[in-house]
Image: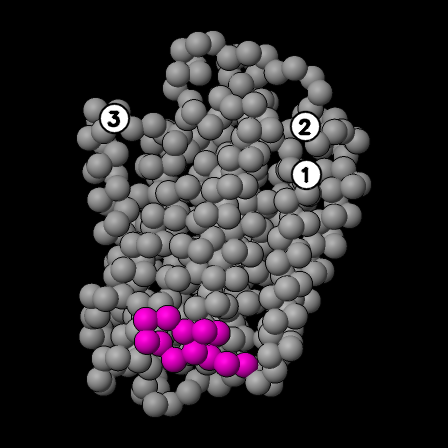
Amino acid sequence: MSILVAETLQLNSDVDNSTQPPDWAGFTATGIAVLFYGSNYVPVKKFDTGDGMLFQFFLCLGIWLVGMAVNAIRAFPLFHPTVLLGGAIWTFGNLFAVPIIQTIGMGLGILIWGMFNMLTGWATGRFGVLGIPPQVPNSLAFNYAGVAISAVASVLFFFEGSISVYDDVFANQEQGSSTGLYPSLSAGRRRGDKAPIVSQTAPVPAAPQQLQKQPFWLQMSPLRRRIFGVTLSVLIGPMFGVGFVPTYYVQAHVPGASKNGLDYVFAHFTGIFSASSVFLILYTVATGNRPSGSPRIILPAIVSGMMWGVAGASWFLANQVLSESISYPIISSAPAIVAALWSVCVFREIRGARNLVILCIAICMCTAGSIMNGLSKT
């Protein structure tokens, strides 16, 4: 996979700004972005991320390292400071990724924020913002129908049940286990035994000193945790959806600006890492230099960030080759399907016949909406 990514980027570096890479490069980039966006949180699932601040910093470091590699491949193109803003906005939204995953699970979290990300990205491209020319699709009927279907799918995702495994973490900690944030489920659940959405067995209460070390959202009741996680997912989706706007603004308003999306990857990723560094400094001062989280999260977070960086760079390339009207609906929604497969097949966060049926319907509708949005161009 890494060789394929490098060859795709190298192919794009061999052409000038006026030459369009072949369509297969765009579709390859789209597939890479979908796979890596849907899987990039998997490396940290078994580790204690604390309140997420240390995790987000090292994740952003991994992203920036990929940006440096892309910048070198592109022979160090002109740096546009305006593009930093898109990365900074993304970082602010990403601060809430860990609370979301801890409260409603990786699959459901990415499904919801990915859907609102798609809606925001579609709206900014369809109607235009900040003087950016709107991209009006050839078939408005297909376009609007695709957006409507995707919106309905997001509602179905809310009613899909996602098991919370944090109660198991409390129980394992009481027994002296050194499990991570998402421990393996019990043997009965691994065998596929039927179980309710949330276990009816009362969890072993944690000691007061343990509760004080946990973020406040993990001390909520299961229902409040779910509402909290869903609300955060809805709020950060639009933050992710406007990340490309500064890049499009530069391309539309700066004379001689490159039309090659990869030439803006490093600036965008630098905005991500810079904002992450500022947030970490403020957090460290506010907590009296007592950050929450285990040092063991450092390497998994960097790996997670590098996976995200590969996906992000691929998205820039896909936008250039296929156009945003095709790539954006696919890349912003399809990773949710990959994440859901991780949740169902590996982590068993989504269980029960009812939940699986609803999830399948939602995935089918999400796929149909993405296809209709893509076809609306033609």
Specify the color scheme. Answer: one colour
Foreground residue among 130 and 102? 130
Secondary structure mainly formed by the magenta segment: loop
Rendered position, 229 above or below 88: above
Rendered position, 273 above or below 280: below
Type of amino acid under label 1: Gly
- Using residue 280 as the reference point, say whether residue 47 is left or right of it: right
Residue 316 image offset from top left, x and y in percent: 40, 70
Residue 49 image offset from top left, x and y in percent: 41, 33
Q: Which residue is drawn at 46% across and 79% down?
A: 135
Foreground residue among 160 and 291? 160
Foreground residue among 72 and 375? 375
- Using residue 158 as the reference point, say whether residue 179 is left or right of it: left
Q: Give the range drawn in magenta.
A: 126-137
Q: What element carries label 1?
A: loop
Magenta run includes residue 112: no
Q: Say which mark, if any, is on residue 287.
A: 3
Type of amino acid under label 3: Thr
Earlier in the chain: of badge 3 and badge 2, it is 2
Label 2 Cα neighbours within 10 Å, binned few <14 / some 14-19 / many ≥20 = some
Q: Say which mark, if any, is on residue 198.
A: 2
Rendered position, 348 above or below 248: above
Q: How far apart are marks 3 and 2 (CA)?
A: 33 Å
Q: Residue at x 32, y 76 (%)?
A: 131
Q: Distance between the residues labelled 3 and 1?
A: 35 Å
* Label 3 close to label 2 by CB (< 8 Å): no
In the picture of the structure, the residue carrying the numbered disc 1 is 161
* Label 3 close to label 1 by CB (< 8 Å): no
